[in-house]
Image (spheres, rainbow, N blue to C red):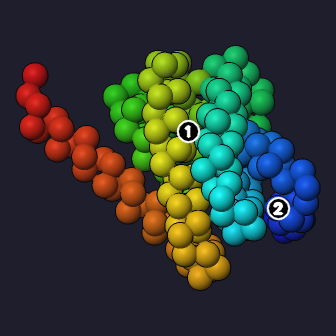
Amino acid sequence: MLSALYDWTMRKAAGASAPRALAVVSFAESSVFPIPPDVLLVPMVLAARDRAWSLAGTCTIASVLGGLAGYAIGFFLFETTGRWVIGLYGLQHGFESFRAAYGEWGLWITLVKGLTPIPFKVVTIASGAAAFDLPVFVLASIATRGARFFLVAALVRRYGEPVRVFVERRLTLLTTILAIALVGGFVALRVLLPR
């Protein structure tokens, strides 16, 4: 099933309706769909480098809106749809402790997980299930998803085909480095700006 979804996503990257497909995949990936939008974003930016920023913006906006759908699933439908989605990814055993961590670490979890290829839908559903502060969730989602998609678009726009291969092989490493830098910046701010 996963390879069929991946093949469908790759076909969409080459079609005339690619930007619309990019928005749909970005939206769905934040709540239920397993394929990250990067697999569409990279070839689309390669095909039209002058549209890199608008494509990254499409990914970001659709991903945040999809995140709100995931939040709604967690908030309103956790016992039915939310548990089903979490079960699809085999994450039901660790999910309760993950959801409980939101009380203290919700912002940090959203920031770090939003940057990495770890399924963002888990974060969005957990945020809703824990009734995490919605405006903070939205702002953190905009920051992290935007950083991720604009970084990928910038690299592909600047370096072209060689970066496609690099990004596909090392996406986890790149986004993890960005997440560490972002968290380090927040830690530095807390140290430098005492209450």
Q: 89 or 166, which is in the foreground?
A: 166
Give the residue at mark 1: 123
Quadrant in which residue 195 is drawn: top left
Mark number displayed over residue 146? none
Which residue lies at the image location 61% right of the left edge and 75% below the top edge? 160
Residue 75 in the image: state x and y as whole percent.
Answer: 64, 19
Residue 20 in the image: state x and y as whole percent.
Answer: 83, 44
Quadrant in which residue 73 is drawn: top right
Q: 23 or 123, which is in the foreground?
A: 23
Q: Establish if 161 lies above or below 125.
A: below
Which residue lies at the image location 43% right of the left edge and 47% below the top edge? 112
Which residue lies at the image location 11% right of the left edge and 31% below the top edge? 193
Q: Which residue type does callout 1 highlight?
A: Val
Q: Which residue type does callout 2 highlight?
A: Ala
**Earlier along the polypeptide chain: callout 1 or callout 2?**
2
**Contact, CB < 8 Å: mark 1 with mark 2?**
no
Give the residue at mark 2: 13
Q: Establish if 65 lies above or below 14.
A: above
Please identify the quadrant where the N terminus is shown.
bottom right
Q: Establish if 129 lies above or below 28.
A: above
Left or right, residue 1 beside residue 168: right
